[in-house]
Amino acid sequence: MPTWRLAFYANRDDKYPSRFDIIDAKDDTDAAVQASKMMGNSEMRVDVTRTIVKNK
């Protein structure tokens, strides 16, 4: 299953994420759904990027 990197941002125009997370999801749609469920109340956006995690 592909691995996805999530970068959460507190403000819409922030250049630097407030936190990161790594998830497994079958495709980009599934990753986006999971990411939106993980967003905190103070987070305005999340960037989802497919990635390779070594030694997982």
Image (cartoon, rainbow, N blue to C red):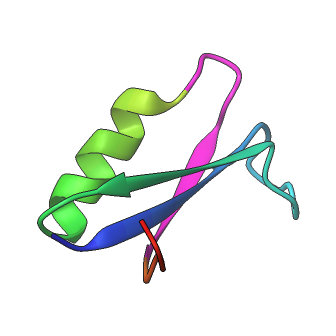
Q: x, y (%) of residue 54? A: 48, 80
Name the quadrant containing residue 47: bottom right
Q: Quadrant of residue 24?
A: bottom left
Q: Is residue 37 above or below residue 3?
A: above
Viewport quadrant of the C terminus:
bottom left
Can you say whether 17 is above or below 3 in the image? Answer: above
Residue at 87% in and 64% down:
15
Is 13 displayed left or right of 30 in the figure?
Answer: right
Q: Residue at x 37, y 53 (%)?
A: 23
The question of residue 21 being in magenta is answered with no
Look at 79% across and 53% down and name the residue there: 17
Front one among 2 and 43: 2
Nearer the observer, 39 or 50: 50
Is residue 42 within the magenta segment? yes
Does 23 sit left or right of 15 as displayed? left
Residue 20 % position (x, y): 66, 50
What is the number of callouts on the image? 0
Q: Residue furthest front?
A: 55
The quadrant where residue 25 appears = bottom left
The range drawn in magenta is: 40-50
Rendering coords of residue 1 (x, y %): 15, 70
Please report the residue visible at 25 percent of the width from the left and 44 percent of the height from the top: 33
